[in-house]
């Protein structure tokens, strides 16, 4: 589900997060207030969508966020680029994302407590408790420069792959992105399969979500990618 993002000017966007936006990502408003990993992934997705739709880039530029809870159904976030860090106002939260989706290191360390402090009373008023991330079912994403690399990796793994996999194509960059979830595999087997994939592609360490791939990339295989290619 696309979030509603509007470009105010070259330096500012407005994002309206509805109850449905959060529910489709298995998020509660309280998770934004408590800065869970799911919340940080939402902000990465938000910045990617703004970049995709409006060319709103903020690499190496501090950002200010003003959170404005409207009602129990939605919250509005105003995100502004700040060329001069000295101009940062204490009313705002800050974070400095990396906009290169496929680079390592995008972990949103700057997800600031000010944003959480601003949203926490609202979340508590709604009596919401944050839903913890489920580490038992992780999903990793690998980027490949060609379909042949994906096929080579699939051949190495084999058709008996126990993990759910899907394949997408970023037509702008002419790259392929493969998602792999733990599924019913043991942690040892899941780690081994990810190691094989890393020999042929590059793991995406944050900065992009599977939801973003479904919305903005071409779906090549929605399921059983490794199993089908291996056959």
Image: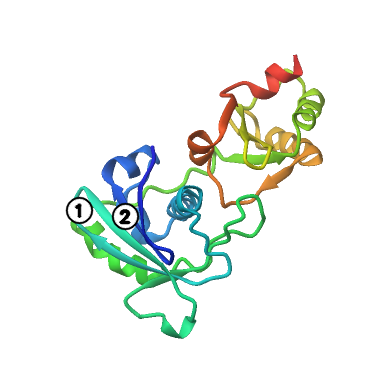
Residue 115 circle label: none
**Viewer-proximal residue, 15 or 174?**
174
Query: Residue at label 2?
Result: 30
Dividing the image into 4 quarters, which one contains the C terminus? top right
* Residue 179, placed above or below residue 158: below
Which residue: 62% across, 36% down? 171
Q: Residues within 10 Å of mark 2 (few under 14, many from 20)?
A: many
Which residue: 37% across, 47% down? 131
Residue 1 coordinates in the image, percent (x, y): 38, 37
Q: Secondary structure at mark 2?
A: helix
Which residue: 44% across, 50% down? 42
Q: Earlier in the sequence, mark 1 or mark 2?
A: 2
Q: Spatial distance from mark 1 to mark 2, Cα to Cα?
A: 9 Å
Query: Residue at label 1?
Result: 126
**Do labels 1 and 2 touch, CB within 8 Å?**
yes
Left/right of residue 1 with respect to residue 145 in the rendered view: left
**Viewer-proximal residue, 9 or 107?**
9
Residue 178 coordinates in the image, percent (x, y): 65, 34
* Colour pattern of the rendering: rainbow
Q: Residues within 10 Å of mark 1 (few under 14, many from 20)?
A: few
Residue 127 coordinates in the image, percent (x, y): 21, 53
As drawn, the residue found furthest toward the front would be 9
* Residue 19, placed above or below residue 154: below
* Residue 7, placed above or below residue 170: below
As drawn, the residue found furthest toward the bottom would be 86
């Amino acid at each position: 589900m696309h979030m509603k993002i509007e470009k105010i000017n070259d330096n500012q966007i407005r994002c309206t997060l509805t109850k449905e936006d959060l529910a489709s990502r298995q998020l509660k408003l309280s998770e934004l207030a408590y800065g869970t990993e799911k919340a940080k992934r939402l902000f990465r997705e938000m910045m990617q969508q703004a970049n995709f739709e409006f060319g709103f880039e903020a690499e190496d530029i501090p950002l200010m966020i003003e959170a404005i809870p409207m009602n129990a159904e939605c919250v509005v976030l105003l995100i502004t680029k700040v060329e001069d860090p000295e101009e940062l106002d204490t009313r705002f939260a800050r974070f400095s994302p990396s906009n290169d989706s496929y680079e390592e290191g995008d972990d949103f360390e700057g997800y600031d407590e000010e944003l959480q402090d601003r949203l926490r009373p609202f979340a508590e008023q709604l009596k919401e408790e944050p839903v913890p991330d489920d580490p038992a079912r992780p999903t990793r994403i690998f980027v490949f420069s060609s379909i042949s690399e994906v096929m080579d990796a699939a051949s190495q793994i084999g058709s008996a792959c126990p993990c759910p996999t899907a394949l997408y194509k970023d037509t702008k960059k002419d790259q392929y992105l493969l998602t792999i979830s733990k599924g019913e595999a043991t942690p040892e087997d899941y780690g081994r399969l990810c190691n094989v994939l890393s020999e042929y592609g590059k793991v995406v360490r944050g900065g992009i979500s599977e939801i973003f791939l479904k919305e903005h990339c071409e779906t090549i295989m929605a399921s059983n990618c490794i199993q089908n290619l291996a056959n």
